[in-house]
Amino acid sequence: MTALILGAVLLAFALVILVMPFALFLLGGGGDAARFSTFLRGFVITSITVGVAGLVSLVFGLVTRK
């Protein structure tokens, strides 16, 4: 049960990490899209890493569920 909760929380964190730079870009009034894409790349890599960890945890929780 704990792995299911951990997986869901990690997937939610991955979504927040992915959406946060877009929200900050829009709240900041936009700007140079080319510079934003290089800034965004780090957030996407982090979001994918956290999302994969969440999926692995979620699948592990589903497989070992009693």
Image: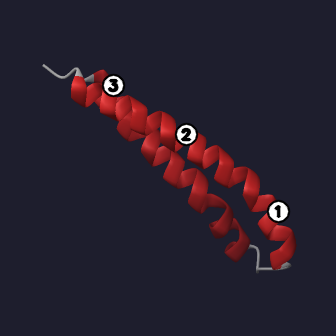
Q: Could you say which quadrant of the image residue 30 lies in?
A: bottom right
Query: Which residue is painted at 55% across and 39% down in the image?
Result: 50
Q: The disc labelled 1 sits on which kind of residue?
A: Thr
Q: In this view, does 27 lie above or below 7?
A: below
Task: Indicate the secondary structure of the residue bearing disc 3.
Answer: helix
Q: Where is residue 42 in the image (x, y as percent from the top left)?
A: 75, 51
Q: Mark 2: few, some, or many residues within 10 Å (few <14, many ≥20)?
A: many
Q: Where is residue 58 in the image (x, y as percent from the top left)?
A: 34, 34
Mark 3 in CB contact with mark 1 (< 8 angstroms): no
Task: Indicate the secondary structure of the residue bearing disc 1.
Answer: helix
Instruction: Say which residue label 3 marks.
Output: 3
Q: Mark 1: few, some, or many residues within 10 Å (few <14, many ≥20)?
A: few
Q: In this view, does 2 lie to the left or right of 50?
A: left
Mark 2 in CB contact with mark 1 (< 8 angstroms): no
Query: Which residue is painted at 41% across and 32% down in the image?
Result: 56
Instruction: Say which residue label 2 marks.
Output: 50
Q: Mark 3: few, some, or many residues within 10 Å (few <14, many ≥20)?
A: some
Q: Distance between the residues labelled 2 and 1?
A: 20 Å
User: Which one is earlier in the sequence, the residue at label 3 or at label 1?
Assistant: 3
Q: In this view, does 60 lie above or below 51?
A: above
Q: Position of residue 33 (x, y in %)?
A: 80, 78
Q: Position of residue 29 (x, y in %)?
A: 76, 80
Which residue extends farthest left? 66
Mark seen at residue 12: none
Task: Indicate the secondary structure of the residue bearing disc 2.
Answer: helix
Q: How far apart are marks 3 and 1 (CA)?
A: 34 Å
Q: How far apart are marks 2 and 3 (CA)?
A: 14 Å
Considering the image in quadrants, where does the N terminus appear? top left
Instruction: Say which residue label 1 marks.
Output: 38
Q: The disc labelled 3 sits on which kind of residue?
A: Ala
